[in-house]
Amino acid sequence: MNNLDIEREKINKIDKEMAELFEQRMNCSKAVANYKKEKGLPILDKNREEAIILNNSNYINNEEIKGYYVNFMRDVMKISRLYQHTLLNGMKIAYSGVEGAFAHIASGKIFPESTRVAFQNFNLAYEAVVNGECDCAVLPIENSSAGEVGTVMDLIFNGNLYINGIYELSVSQNLLGVKNSKISDIKKVISHIQALEQCNTYIKQHNLNAQLCENTAKAAQLVAKMNDKSVAAIASQETAEIYGLDVLDSNINECHQNSTRFAVLSRSQHIKTVNKPDNHSVLVFAVRNDAGALAKAINIIGKYGFNMRTLRSRSLKDLLWQYYFYVEVEGNLYTENGQDMLKELSPLCDKLKVVGTFYNHIDLK
Protein backbone atom coordinates (compact mmCIF):
# COMPACT_ATOMS: atom_id res chain seq x y z
CA MET A 1 0.00 0.00 0.00
CA ASN A 2 1.53 3.33 -1.08
CA ASN A 3 1.44 6.56 0.91
CA LEU A 4 -1.63 7.85 -0.99
CA ASP A 5 -3.63 4.72 -0.17
CA ILE A 6 -2.57 4.93 3.46
CA GLU A 7 -3.78 8.54 3.79
CA ARG A 8 -7.02 7.74 1.98
CA GLU A 9 -7.64 4.87 4.36
CA LYS A 10 -7.16 7.24 7.29
CA ILE A 11 -9.64 9.69 5.73
CA ASN A 12 -12.19 6.92 5.22
CA LYS A 13 -11.93 5.98 8.89
CA ILE A 14 -12.25 9.61 9.99
CA ASP A 15 -15.22 10.13 7.66
CA LYS A 16 -16.97 7.13 9.20
CA GLU A 17 -16.45 8.55 12.68
CA MET A 18 -17.60 12.00 11.52
CA ALA A 19 -20.75 10.48 9.98
CA GLU A 20 -21.59 8.81 13.30
CA LEU A 21 -20.95 12.06 15.17
CA PHE A 22 -22.97 14.01 12.60
CA GLU A 23 -25.95 11.71 13.17
CA GLN A 24 -25.61 12.18 16.93
CA ARG A 25 -25.44 15.95 16.48
CA MET A 26 -28.55 16.02 14.30
CA ASN A 27 -30.42 13.93 16.87
CA CYS A 28 -29.50 16.58 19.45
CA SER A 29 -30.70 19.26 17.00
CA LYS A 30 -34.04 17.45 16.82
CA ALA A 31 -34.33 17.53 20.62
CA VAL A 32 -33.45 21.25 20.56
CA ALA A 33 -36.13 21.86 17.91
CA ASN A 34 -38.74 20.15 20.08
CA TYR A 35 -37.68 22.27 23.06
CA LYS A 36 -37.89 25.47 20.99
CA LYS A 37 -41.35 24.53 19.76
CA GLU A 38 -42.53 23.95 23.35
CA LYS A 39 -41.07 27.24 24.59
CA GLY A 40 -41.93 29.34 21.54
CA LEU A 41 -38.31 30.13 20.71
CA PRO A 42 -37.02 30.97 17.20
CA ILE A 43 -34.62 28.64 15.39
CA LEU A 44 -31.79 31.14 14.95
CA ASP A 45 -29.87 32.24 18.03
CA LYS A 46 -27.03 34.32 16.60
CA ASN A 47 -25.39 35.00 19.96
CA ARG A 48 -25.14 31.31 20.81
CA GLU A 49 -23.89 30.33 17.37
CA GLU A 50 -21.11 32.90 17.45
CA ALA A 51 -20.15 31.86 21.00
CA ILE A 52 -19.94 28.18 19.97
CA ILE A 53 -17.82 28.96 16.91
CA LEU A 54 -15.47 31.15 18.94
CA ASN A 55 -15.14 28.57 21.70
CA ASN A 56 -14.73 25.55 19.42
CA SER A 57 -12.16 27.23 17.19
CA ASN A 58 -9.86 27.24 20.22
CA TYR A 59 -9.70 23.44 19.92
CA ILE A 60 -7.77 23.86 16.65
CA ASN A 61 -4.04 24.13 17.30
CA ASN A 62 -3.01 24.61 13.69
CA GLU A 63 -3.52 28.32 12.96
CA GLU A 64 -3.22 27.65 9.22
CA ILE A 65 -6.48 25.67 9.15
CA LYS A 66 -8.40 27.44 11.94
CA GLY A 67 -10.20 29.68 9.46
CA TYR A 68 -11.34 26.64 7.48
CA TYR A 69 -12.72 25.13 10.66
CA VAL A 70 -14.76 28.30 11.34
CA ASN A 71 -16.28 27.98 7.85
CA PHE A 72 -16.94 24.28 8.49
CA MET A 73 -18.78 25.11 11.73
CA ARG A 74 -20.87 27.76 10.01
CA ASP A 75 -21.95 25.18 7.44
CA VAL A 76 -22.78 22.68 10.20
CA MET A 77 -24.88 25.33 11.97
CA LYS A 78 -26.70 26.15 8.73
CA ILE A 79 -27.51 22.49 8.08
CA SER A 80 -28.73 22.11 11.66
CA ARG A 81 -31.04 25.13 11.26
CA LEU A 82 -32.44 23.77 7.99
CA TYR A 83 -33.21 20.47 9.72
CA GLN A 84 -34.90 22.26 12.62
CA HIS A 85 -36.94 24.40 10.21
CA THR A 86 -38.19 21.22 8.54
CA LEU A 87 -39.12 19.72 11.90
CA LEU A 88 -40.96 22.86 12.97
CA ASN A 89 -42.76 23.42 9.68
CA GLY A 90 -46.05 22.51 11.38
CA MET A 91 -45.60 25.00 14.22
CA LYS A 92 -48.70 27.21 14.62
CA ILE A 93 -48.34 30.85 15.61
CA ALA A 94 -51.37 32.82 16.82
CA TYR A 95 -51.68 36.53 16.09
CA SER A 96 -54.43 39.12 16.16
CA GLY A 97 -55.62 40.52 12.87
CA VAL A 98 -55.59 39.40 9.26
CA GLU A 99 -52.87 38.82 6.70
CA GLY A 100 -50.68 41.91 6.45
CA ALA A 101 -51.15 43.06 10.05
CA PHE A 102 -47.93 44.10 11.80
CA ALA A 103 -48.27 41.07 14.09
CA HIS A 104 -48.54 38.89 10.97
CA ILE A 105 -45.35 40.48 9.62
CA ALA A 106 -43.51 40.10 12.95
CA SER A 107 -44.60 36.46 13.31
CA GLY A 108 -43.22 35.66 9.87
CA LYS A 109 -39.87 37.25 10.68
CA ILE A 110 -39.52 35.42 14.01
CA PHE A 111 -40.85 32.05 12.79
CA PRO A 112 -40.37 32.03 8.99
CA GLU A 113 -41.26 28.35 8.55
CA SER A 114 -44.37 28.38 10.73
CA THR A 115 -48.08 28.45 9.94
CA ARG A 116 -49.55 31.77 11.07
CA VAL A 117 -53.10 31.58 12.40
CA ALA A 118 -55.21 34.75 12.51
CA PHE A 119 -57.62 35.57 15.34
CA GLN A 120 -60.09 38.40 15.66
CA ASN A 121 -58.60 39.89 18.83
CA PHE A 122 -55.81 39.57 21.39
CA ASN A 123 -57.88 37.50 23.80
CA LEU A 124 -58.71 34.84 21.23
CA ALA A 125 -55.09 34.63 20.07
CA TYR A 126 -53.94 34.25 23.68
CA GLU A 127 -56.55 31.58 24.45
CA ALA A 128 -55.59 29.63 21.35
CA VAL A 129 -52.21 28.98 22.98
CA VAL A 130 -53.72 28.27 26.40
CA ASN A 131 -56.00 25.57 24.98
CA GLY A 132 -53.31 24.07 22.75
CA GLU A 133 -54.77 25.13 19.40
CA CYS A 134 -51.52 27.03 18.66
CA ASP A 135 -47.95 26.62 19.91
CA CYS A 136 -47.35 30.27 20.77
CA ALA A 137 -48.73 33.75 20.21
CA VAL A 138 -47.01 36.89 18.94
CA LEU A 139 -48.74 39.90 20.50
CA PRO A 140 -47.78 43.60 20.70
CA ILE A 141 -47.00 44.93 24.14
CA GLU A 142 -45.76 48.45 23.47
CA ASN A 143 -45.42 51.05 20.73
CA SER A 144 -42.76 53.74 20.90
CA SER A 145 -45.31 56.46 20.07
CA ALA A 146 -48.65 55.25 21.43
CA GLY A 147 -47.37 53.44 24.53
CA GLU A 148 -48.47 50.17 26.09
CA VAL A 149 -51.06 47.79 24.68
CA GLY A 150 -53.23 47.56 27.78
CA THR A 151 -55.30 44.54 26.74
CA VAL A 152 -52.18 42.43 26.23
CA MET A 153 -50.70 43.66 29.52
CA ASP A 154 -53.87 42.49 31.29
CA LEU A 155 -53.66 39.08 29.62
CA ILE A 156 -50.06 38.72 30.77
CA PHE A 157 -51.01 39.60 34.35
CA ASN A 158 -54.15 37.47 34.60
CA GLY A 159 -53.18 34.57 32.33
CA ASN A 160 -50.70 31.73 32.65
CA LEU A 161 -48.59 32.05 29.52
CA TYR A 162 -44.92 33.02 29.63
CA ILE A 163 -42.85 35.49 27.64
CA ASN A 164 -39.86 33.75 26.05
CA GLY A 165 -38.77 36.58 23.78
CA ILE A 166 -39.44 40.23 22.95
CA TYR A 167 -38.76 41.53 19.44
CA GLU A 168 -38.86 45.03 18.01
CA LEU A 169 -40.38 45.77 14.60
CA SER A 170 -39.99 49.15 12.92
CA VAL A 171 -43.46 50.41 11.99
CA SER A 172 -44.16 52.68 9.05
CA GLN A 173 -47.77 53.76 8.67
CA ASN A 174 -49.08 54.59 5.22
CA LEU A 175 -52.25 56.11 3.78
CA LEU A 176 -53.84 53.45 1.56
CA GLY A 177 -56.66 54.12 -0.89
CA VAL A 178 -58.46 52.27 -3.64
CA LYS A 179 -57.03 52.29 -7.14
CA ASN A 180 -56.87 55.70 -8.90
CA SER A 181 -57.79 57.60 -5.71
CA LYS A 182 -55.84 60.70 -4.59
CA ILE A 183 -55.07 62.25 -1.22
CA SER A 184 -57.47 65.07 -2.02
CA ASP A 185 -60.30 62.53 -2.39
CA ILE A 186 -59.95 61.19 1.16
CA LYS A 187 -62.48 62.29 3.76
CA LYS A 188 -62.28 59.39 6.24
CA VAL A 189 -59.51 57.11 7.49
CA ILE A 190 -59.97 53.71 9.13
CA SER A 191 -57.40 51.98 11.34
CA HIS A 192 -56.51 50.55 14.74
CA ILE A 193 -56.58 53.04 17.60
CA GLN A 194 -52.80 52.96 18.05
CA ALA A 195 -52.19 53.62 14.34
CA LEU A 196 -54.62 56.55 14.50
CA GLU A 197 -52.79 57.91 17.54
CA GLN A 198 -49.44 57.51 15.78
CA CYS A 199 -50.79 59.52 12.82
CA ASN A 200 -52.86 62.02 14.77
CA THR A 201 -50.99 65.08 13.48
CA TYR A 202 -51.38 63.98 9.87
CA ILE A 203 -55.10 63.28 10.35
CA LYS A 204 -55.70 66.74 11.82
CA GLN A 205 -53.65 68.49 9.13
CA HIS A 206 -55.77 66.89 6.41
CA ASN A 207 -59.05 67.37 8.32
CA LEU A 208 -59.94 63.70 8.13
CA ASN A 209 -62.56 61.81 10.10
CA ALA A 210 -61.15 58.81 11.95
CA GLN A 211 -62.91 55.49 12.37
CA LEU A 212 -61.71 52.69 14.63
CA CYS A 213 -61.06 49.17 13.39
CA GLU A 214 -59.78 46.00 15.11
CA ASN A 215 -56.38 46.26 13.42
CA THR A 216 -54.59 47.98 10.54
CA ALA A 217 -54.77 45.10 8.06
CA LYS A 218 -58.49 44.61 8.71
CA ALA A 219 -58.94 48.32 7.94
CA ALA A 220 -57.15 47.87 4.60
CA GLN A 221 -59.30 44.84 3.85
CA LEU A 222 -62.44 46.86 4.64
CA VAL A 223 -61.39 49.78 2.42
CA ALA A 224 -60.72 47.39 -0.47
CA LYS A 225 -64.23 45.92 -0.08
CA MET A 226 -65.89 49.34 0.15
CA ASN A 227 -64.13 50.54 -3.02
CA ASP A 228 -64.87 54.14 -2.05
CA LYS A 229 -62.35 56.78 -3.15
CA SER A 230 -63.23 58.97 -0.16
CA VAL A 231 -62.20 56.32 2.39
CA ALA A 232 -58.62 55.27 3.16
CA ALA A 233 -56.87 52.97 5.58
CA ILE A 234 -53.75 53.56 7.65
CA ALA A 235 -51.66 50.41 7.47
CA SER A 236 -48.40 48.86 6.25
CA GLN A 237 -47.11 48.88 2.69
CA GLU A 238 -47.26 45.06 2.73
CA THR A 239 -50.98 45.32 3.40
CA ALA A 240 -51.47 47.52 0.33
CA GLU A 241 -49.90 44.83 -1.83
CA ILE A 242 -52.08 42.09 -0.31
CA TYR A 243 -55.39 43.92 -0.76
CA GLY A 244 -54.69 45.72 -4.03
CA LEU A 245 -54.63 49.27 -2.64
CA ASP A 246 -52.53 52.26 -3.68
CA VAL A 247 -50.09 53.89 -1.29
CA LEU A 248 -51.27 57.52 -1.37
CA ASP A 249 -48.76 58.77 1.20
CA SER A 250 -45.88 57.00 2.97
CA ASN A 251 -44.53 57.08 6.51
CA ILE A 252 -47.24 59.37 7.85
CA ASN A 253 -46.71 58.49 11.53
CA GLU A 254 -45.79 61.48 13.66
CA CYS A 255 -42.58 59.93 14.98
CA HIS A 256 -40.40 58.47 12.24
CA GLN A 257 -38.52 56.36 14.77
CA ASN A 258 -41.71 54.37 15.25
CA SER A 259 -41.49 50.76 16.43
CA THR A 260 -43.59 48.14 18.18
CA ARG A 261 -42.35 45.54 20.62
CA PHE A 262 -43.88 42.08 20.25
CA ALA A 263 -43.84 39.38 22.92
CA VAL A 264 -43.73 35.68 22.09
CA LEU A 265 -45.99 33.90 24.58
CA SER A 266 -46.07 30.13 25.16
CA ARG A 267 -47.38 27.63 27.70
CA SER A 268 -43.94 26.65 28.96
CA GLN A 269 -41.17 28.85 30.31
CA HIS A 270 -37.60 28.96 29.03
CA ILE A 271 -35.72 29.15 32.33
CA LYS A 272 -32.10 30.30 32.31
CA THR A 273 -30.13 29.84 35.51
CA VAL A 274 -26.99 31.61 34.30
CA ASN A 275 -27.04 35.39 34.06
CA LYS A 276 -25.65 37.08 30.97
CA PRO A 277 -25.20 40.81 30.28
CA ASP A 278 -28.03 40.92 27.73
CA ASN A 279 -30.57 38.98 29.84
CA HIS A 280 -33.88 40.68 30.64
CA SER A 281 -36.78 39.50 32.80
CA VAL A 282 -40.42 40.47 33.22
CA LEU A 283 -42.36 40.21 36.46
CA VAL A 284 -45.86 41.37 37.37
CA PHE A 285 -47.09 42.04 40.88
CA ALA A 286 -49.84 43.68 42.90
CA VAL A 287 -48.70 45.14 46.22
CA ARG A 288 -50.71 44.88 49.42
CA ASN A 289 -52.81 47.91 50.33
CA ASP A 290 -50.28 49.19 52.89
CA ALA A 291 -48.66 52.61 53.13
CA GLY A 292 -45.37 52.73 51.20
CA ALA A 293 -45.73 49.18 49.85
CA LEU A 294 -44.89 50.14 46.26
CA ALA A 295 -41.86 52.22 47.30
CA LYS A 296 -40.59 49.28 49.38
CA ALA A 297 -41.07 46.91 46.45
CA ILE A 298 -39.14 49.17 44.07
CA ASN A 299 -36.35 49.59 46.63
CA ILE A 300 -36.03 45.80 47.00
CA ILE A 301 -35.69 45.36 43.24
CA GLY A 302 -32.97 48.01 43.14
CA LYS A 303 -31.28 46.64 46.28
CA TYR A 304 -30.45 43.40 44.44
CA GLY A 305 -28.98 45.27 41.47
CA PHE A 306 -31.86 44.89 39.00
CA ASN A 307 -32.19 48.00 36.90
CA MET A 308 -35.81 48.59 35.87
CA ARG A 309 -36.09 49.19 32.14
CA THR A 310 -39.90 49.48 32.28
CA LEU A 311 -42.39 50.12 35.10
CA ARG A 312 -46.05 50.33 34.14
CA SER A 313 -49.21 50.35 36.24
CA ARG A 314 -52.63 49.01 35.24
CA SER A 315 -55.87 49.08 37.19
CA LEU A 316 -57.22 45.82 38.60
CA LYS A 317 -60.59 45.19 37.00
CA ASP A 318 -62.19 43.60 40.06
CA LEU A 319 -60.82 46.00 42.70
CA LEU A 320 -61.66 49.71 42.53
CA TRP A 321 -58.61 52.01 42.65
CA GLN A 322 -56.23 49.09 42.99
CA TYR A 323 -53.37 48.53 40.55
CA TYR A 324 -50.92 45.92 39.38
CA PHE A 325 -47.44 46.63 38.02
CA TYR A 326 -45.59 45.33 34.97
CA VAL A 327 -41.81 45.50 35.40
CA GLU A 328 -39.05 44.68 32.93
CA VAL A 329 -35.61 44.47 34.51
CA GLU A 330 -32.11 44.02 33.20
CA GLY A 331 -30.88 40.65 34.46
CA ASN A 332 -32.06 37.12 35.11
CA LEU A 333 -34.52 36.49 37.94
CA TYR A 334 -33.70 32.76 38.01
CA THR A 335 -30.20 33.32 39.32
CA GLU A 336 -29.59 32.89 43.05
CA ASN A 337 -29.57 36.68 43.41
CA GLY A 338 -32.88 36.95 41.56
CA GLN A 339 -34.53 34.28 43.67
CA ASP A 340 -33.37 36.02 46.86
CA MET A 341 -34.91 39.25 45.60
CA LEU A 342 -38.23 37.53 44.89
CA LYS A 343 -38.30 35.98 48.37
CA GLU A 344 -37.88 39.39 49.98
CA LEU A 345 -40.43 40.97 47.62
CA SER A 346 -43.11 38.31 48.06
CA PRO A 347 -44.46 39.34 51.52
CA LEU A 348 -45.29 42.80 50.14
CA CYS A 349 -47.41 41.40 47.29
CA ASP A 350 -50.88 39.97 46.90
CA LYS A 351 -49.71 38.48 43.61
CA LEU A 352 -46.20 38.05 42.24
CA LYS A 353 -45.29 36.23 39.04
CA VAL A 354 -42.16 35.97 36.92
CA VAL A 355 -43.48 36.11 33.37
CA GLY A 356 -40.25 35.25 31.59
CA THR A 357 -36.54 35.68 30.97
CA PHE A 358 -35.09 36.36 27.53
CA TYR A 359 -32.35 38.14 25.62
CA ASN A 360 -32.61 41.91 25.37
CA HIS A 361 -35.00 42.97 22.58
CA ILE A 362 -34.01 41.88 19.08
CA ASP A 363 -34.68 44.07 16.06
CA LEU A 364 -36.64 42.40 13.26
CA LYS A 365 -35.09 43.48 9.96
Image: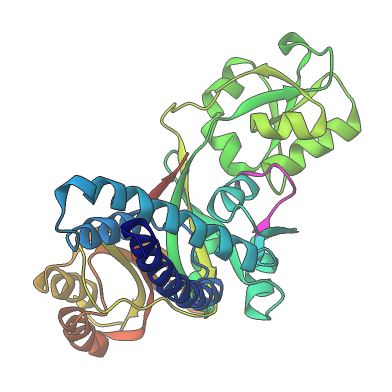
Residue sitting at x 54%, y 78%: 159
Does 84 appear above or below 127? above
**Residue 43's x, y, as percent?**
50, 61
| 70 horizontally vs 40: left or right | left
Residue drawn at x 56%, y 65% as measured from the top left? 84
| Quadrant of residue 217 within the rendered picture | top right
Q: Is residue 173 placed above or below 108 in the rendered structure?
A: above
Q: Is residue 259 left or right of residue 111?
A: left
Q: With 43 as the anchor, is 210 left or right in this view? A: right
Please tell me which residue lies in front, 197 or 127.
Answer: 127
Please indicate, yes or no, whether residue 88 appears anywhere in the rendered image.
no
Residue 168 visible in the shown view: yes
Q: Residue 85: x and y, percent? A: 59, 61
Q: Main secondary structure of the magenta part?
A: loop
Q: Foreground: 266 or 124? A: 266
| Residue 49 placement (x, y as % from top left) | 34, 58
The magenta-colored residue range is 95-102
Residue at 50% across, 74% down: 23
Magenta stretch: residue 98 in it? yes
Q: Does the stretch in magenta take in 40?
A: no
Residue at the farthest front position: 1
Tell which of 342 and 298 is nearer to you.
342
User: Which quadrant: the N terminus?
Assistant: bottom left
Measuring from the top left, give residue 173's x and y in whole percent: 58, 30
Q: Nearer the viewer, residue 80 or 268?
A: 80
Q: Is residue 339 left or right of residue 81?
A: left
Q: How many marks?
A: 0
Q: Is residue 253 above or below residue 42?
A: above
Residue found 52% across the figure and 23% down from its top: 201
Whether 273 is drawn above or below 120: the answer is: below
